[in-house]
Image (cartoon, helix red, strand yellow):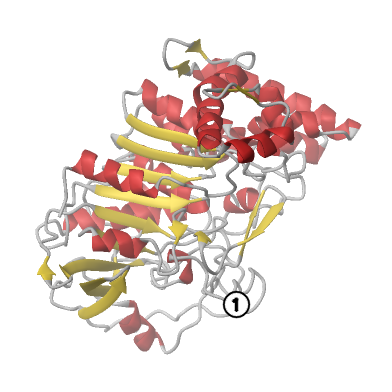
């Protein structure tokens, strides 16, 4: 079989029109473009491109426009370039085990050996004799920790972490003259009929890196500025957005990229946008207990919580994060104070200033732990931890039943899920000396954006936008703060906020974000 072409099909598009907030957008739509020559499952390993042509009849030259690299993953699952995950599930989308969810049968048979040049997934499917793939449907429920949130069908945060206008926020970017790339990738649930898993880590990130390489491979004809790629995603997509941006050109991924036929190009990017990213999973359980351990009442769980908090302290000590504004080294003893001073108090103050006097009084009357003098809020991290609540067991991410997304992500071809922390492995086996296999530890590190930044072995994106709902019940706030801190320590441009009272994938700064993009890229219509 001849290899799939890595050449961008610049002459193969549809010319479509969309009305966004009173603006008529005419754009070129390039659909289902394979981004590697030896795909494992081409259903996922394709991308779409939207290139603006005119806005309200005024021609648009997008040749130098930023490229928004949109990742629509939810729950660390697979996604297709055409899935509803790109904009959030449509009305009536079923959950992960219902109709439309993972588990539809069948691997597309491999095309015959005399196949000619293939340029789209439709061609592949036609030659294969049918559709059908594991995990082809839309994810309706994202499970994080032991928390299950029904993903919205209308307005509200989308899977890509962007607030969802009824039309979809990406149309707003298209209306600004930006190029939109929608990327598919494999995920934790992908499984062939023979039981073999093919989407476990590092598959998703390898796919996304291959897509970045495809764009840069076609820099002379691809719409937009291939040196101004901005990854975007929320939750699981936030993890992917941050990891792609943190691990640019990391040699560790090279054998995997070669195996799927990725282009021989760079895979570093210009910027990353993320909301509530599921990051630093190997230390996420300790972070949850550090923040919300005061809510644990069961004696056995409290014992575990205290132990994981202590392990989190050891991690902080080894990492050596340096707080900004001369704060010094962050430790278990001062991290809470730092988060309160640099993030929570400014955002609580910002929130309160938006309320009128009556609203302020009503709000504060039910939250006596917040003090407000009319100019600035005052609060402690300990009180915040009791207020924010949690919907997670102990351990939350590396749960003992290995039913949560993270241990499933770290399975392998023959095993659906594996523990990814020594502590959970010890609890599960009853062996206090149990240690993870070094190869598995290496894999776990490779999936941690913070680890890549600390190791200084990758070309890390220079610009970062991070938003995390302060009251996200499934994810604690320290990992997002520590990601921002590691980036600041590395000299990167970082815009990070904890959105006060915000939940999962909250971002109330979209207009500010777009202004930030214009500033860092220098691109305006």
* Residue 195: image location, x then y, percent: 62, 69
Q: Nearer the viewer, residue 433 or 152?
A: 152
Can you say whether 492 is above or below 272 in the image? Answer: above
Percent position of residue 392, x then y = 73, 44
| Residue 490 shows in the view | yes
Q: Quadrant of residue 340?
A: top right
Query: How dense is the environment of label 1, judged by Cα within 10 Å: few (below 14), some, or many (20 and up)?
Result: few
> Farthest residue toward the right?
299
Asked whether 388 or 39 is in front, the reply is: 388
Q: Is residue 18 above or below residue 204?
A: below
Q: Quadrant of the N terminus?
A: bottom left
Q: Kindly identify the residue that appears in the image at 58 percent across and 80 percent down.
A: 105
At horizontal 63% and vertical 17% (from top left) the residue drawn is: 332
Task: Work out whether residue 459 can be spotted.
Answer: no
Quadrant (top left/top right/bottom left/bottom right) for the C terminus: bottom left
In the image: residue 362, left or right of residue 494: right
Question: What secondary structure is found at the residue carrying circle 1?
Answer: loop
User: x%, y% of residue 20?
Assistant: 31, 69
* Residue in the foreground of this view, choosing between 311 and 62: 62
Q: Position of residue 349 (x, y in %)?
A: 53, 29
Horizontal placement of 150 versus 246: left or right? Answer: right
The residue labelled by disc 1 is: 92
Q: Which residue lies furthest to the front in this view?
A: 358
Q: Which of 516 and 7 is in front in this view?
A: 516
């Amino acid at each position: 079989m001849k290899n799939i072409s890595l050449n961008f099909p610049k002459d193969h598009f549809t010319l479509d029109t969309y009305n966004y907030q009173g603006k008529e957008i005419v754009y070129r739509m390039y659909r289902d473009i394979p981004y590697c020559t030896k795909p494992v499952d081409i259903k996922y390993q394709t991308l779409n491109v939207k290139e603006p042509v005119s806005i309200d009849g005024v021609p648009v030259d997008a040749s130098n426009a930023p490229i928004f690299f949109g990742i629509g993953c939810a729950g660390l699952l697979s996604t297709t370039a055409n899935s509803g995950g790109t904009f959030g599930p449509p009305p009536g989308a079923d959950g992960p085990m219902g109709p439309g969810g993972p588990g539809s049968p069948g691997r597309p048979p491999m095309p015959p050996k005399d196949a000619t040049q293939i340029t789209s997934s439709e061609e592949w499917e036609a030659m294969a004799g049918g559709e059908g793939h594991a995990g082809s449907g839309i994810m309706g429920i994202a499970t994080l920790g032991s928390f299950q949130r029904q993903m919205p069908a209308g307005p509200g945060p989308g899977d890509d972490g962007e607030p969802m206008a009824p039309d979809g926020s990406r149309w707003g970017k298209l209306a600004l003259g930006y190029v939109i790339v929608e990327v598919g990738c494999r995920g934790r649930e992908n499984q062939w009929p023979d039981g073999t898993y093919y989407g476990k880590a590092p598959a998703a990130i390898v796919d996304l890196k291959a897509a970045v390489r495809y764009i840069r491979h076609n820099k002379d004809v691809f719409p937009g500025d291939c040196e101004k790629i901005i990854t975007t995603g929320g939750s699981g997509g936030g993890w992917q957005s941050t990891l792609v941006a943190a691990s640019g050109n990391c040699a560790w991924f090279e054998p995997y990229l070669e195996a799927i036929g990725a282009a021989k190009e760079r895979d570093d990017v210009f910027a990353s946008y993320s909301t509530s990213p599921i990051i630093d999973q190997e230390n996420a359980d300790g972070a949850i207990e550090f923040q919300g351990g005061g809510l644990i009442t069961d004696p056995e769980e409290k014992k575990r919580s205290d132990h994981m908090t202590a392990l989190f302290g050891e991690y902080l000590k080894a990492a050596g994060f340096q707080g900004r504004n001369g704060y010094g080294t962050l430790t278990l003893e001062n991290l809470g104070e730092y988060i309160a001073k640099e993030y929570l108090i400014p955002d609580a103050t910002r929130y309160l200033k938006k309320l009128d006097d009556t609203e302020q009084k009503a709000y504060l009357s039910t939250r006596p732990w917040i003090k407000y003098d009319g100019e600035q809020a005052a609060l402690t991290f300990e009180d915040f931890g009791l207020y924010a609540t949690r919907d997670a067991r102990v351990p939350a991410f590396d749960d003992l039943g290995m039913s949560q997304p993270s241990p499933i992500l770290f399975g392998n071809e023959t095993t659906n899920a594996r523990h990814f922390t020594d502590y959970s492995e010890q609890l599960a086996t009853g062996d206090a000396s149990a240690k993870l296999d070094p190869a598995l530890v290496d894999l776990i590190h490779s999936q941690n954006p913070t680890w890549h930044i600390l190791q200084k072995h990758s070309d890390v994106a220079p610009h970062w936008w991070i938003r995390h709902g302060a009251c996200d019940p499934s994810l604690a706030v320290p990992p997002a703060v520590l990601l921002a801190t590691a980036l600041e320590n590395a000299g990167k441009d970082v815009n990070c906020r904890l959105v006060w009272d915000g939940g999962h994938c909250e971002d109330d700064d979209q207009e500010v974000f777009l202004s930030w993009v214009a500033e860092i890229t220098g691109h305006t219509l």
